[in-house]
Structures are given as structure tokens and as C-alpha cells.
Image (tube, rainbow, N blue to C red):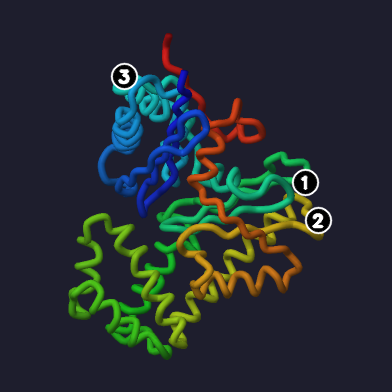
Amino acid sequence: MHKIVIYFDGGGGGIRAGASINGLEEAHKDFAGITPGEGSLVDYLANVVSTFANEFEGDIWRAVLAVATLPADAESYQGIANLVFRNSKVKELWICSDSVSSCAATIAADGVVITAGTGITALAVGKSGTILHSLSGDGHLIGDVASAYWIGRMGLNSAVRSSDGRDQTPGAAQLLEVACQHFKADPYHLPHIVHQSTRAVHAIAQFAQLVNNLASTGNAKALEIIDMAGDEITLIANTAKRVCEGGKDFQVALLGGVLAEDTMIYKNAVSKIQSGGMQLHKSNNTPLDGAKILANNDDAGVYAPLIKVYKAAK
């Protein structure tokens, strides 16, 4: 009898799905990302899980949904489960933050995993392997400092302030020029074009790459933004170590597109983290690998407090 599990990881930039049969990886599929405030989160997430589940014959032993944007109440979580069970052959559904899948993929104890994509999350693990602290991941409305959205927003804020003369710092005018080219707008209409963009949060987050590119050429304003982002990444790491009472071997894993090794923010953050005496943990695993590990485990283990588990009626 085949044991089929499916697993998902993602956020604003996209959701990546994977499946394994008897522990062997079989398939992958990409879905559009989650846009906060646009459409029903419950319906969208349930549809993603059901659509992928229905590509396989037979029952799905477990589905693990690890995403950046989660429901705000128990009724919505249950709503996702009800729709998945009604529209597919999934027998068990786990729902959790993508910080859990990121941690499962990388650090087992005495460290913190910081994942920065469209948004940012972090999960710290104590020496005994017990999860002690979740950090950041507050969403784009009130947090997400050092995420792609935040970097892009800071770059665009400098651009529009340069347009009307409020920001005369070196590099701001070049940010305005690049922003107008990217969004195909003149300076006056730039804010209007950004606000009316399809999936505006994602559109703003994409601008982070251009801020990074300008920083790599020495643009002073872009470098200032990257430096602030590096400070936040370092603050998260230092806070995690303090709260977890980490030892001299406390490790920091940096994941996500914003923290890819070729980015300026990665280099900035690594320099600050290492100068603070913490160890950099490198792994070839991805957050999707962590979701796969969770899907194939017998139980949630130390992650149980952070995972909602639902089972289909027999």
C-alpha cells in the first residue's frame, strides 16, 4: 500500500507544493502567492491543497500546509480543513507557519532560523531541542522589517520623497529614476501606479531586488536601507540567543530570497552576526524540504504546539 503525503511552503511570492510516495519525492507544482486582503484566504488555501491532492490516485495520508499568511481565528483554520476534506481524499491536514518548516529543514537545537522573502519570520530553538521563541513575522501592515516588501517600500518611499524634494540625500534621485523605469511611470504618477498594481504587496516586494542592485553599485541611499535591514536581522539573531540562553555555538541560519548568498543584505547581516560571536549555519535544505520532513514524520514532535492538526471523519 502506497503512503502518499503532500506538502506546501510559501507566502506572497508563491506557494511551492511537493509530494512523496513511501518517502520518495515524486512531484512538484507552483501556485500563485498569497495576497493579504485580496479574496478569501480560507478558500484560496483550501483550493491549493485540494487541487494538488486530486492529481494523485488514492488517499493522501497527510497534507502539510506551511505558509507565511495564516488565518486569524480557529473558525477559519477549521474552514480550510472542512473544504479540503470535502473536496479531496486528504485524510489528515497540518497547518502551520512557514517558520516551522524552515526550522525543521535546518536547525535542531541551539539556534535560530530567519527566513526573509516577501515577509519575514524567525523561529528559535533551545539547546535541548525545545522550541522557545518565535520572532518577527508580524505582517506588512505593522512589521516585516528587513523583508522584501519592507526593503522595496523603503526604496519607493525614498523615491517619492526625492520627487517632491523632501529627500535630497545622495542616491535618492537615482532610486526615483529606477522606480519610474520599473513601474513605467513618471514621477507624479508613480505613487498612483504602485497603489493600483495587481497584488501591490508583491509588486512592492519585487522592487527590493532593484534596491539591492543599486546598493551593489555603491548607491548611498540603497546602502542605508540595506544596512538598516542588516541591523534588524542581527537584532533578531541577538534576541533569539538571549531568550534561548544560547551558548558559544549558537547558530543562525538565513533562508529566503532576500537572504540569498549573492545579495547585499546577506553579506551585511553575516558580517554583523559573525562579529557578534554567533555561528552561521549553512544548509542545502529549503523550507519545502522542512515541510516534507514534517509530512513524513510519525508525529509533530517538538513542533506540536505550533501546528494545527485536523483529521477527516471516518
Query: Which residue has dot 1 on it?
Result: 127
Q: Secondary structure at mark 2?
A: loop
Q: Residue at x 36, y 63 (%)?
A: 205
Query: Which residue has dot 3 on it?
Result: 86
First of labels 3, 2 by sequence position: 3
Q: Residue at x 37, y 85 (%)?
A: 172
Query: Which residue has dot 2 on it?
Result: 247
| Relative to 93, residue 136 above or below | below
Q: Quadrant of residue 279?
A: bottom right
> Residue 32 placed where, x, y %?
30, 48
> Residue 300 placed where, x, y %?
60, 30
Q: How many marks?
A: 3
Q: Residue at x 34, y 43 (%)?
A: 29
In the image, what residue type sits under mark 3? Arg
In screen coordinates, is 190 left or right of 141? left
Q: CA distance from mark 2 to mark 1?
A: 8 Å
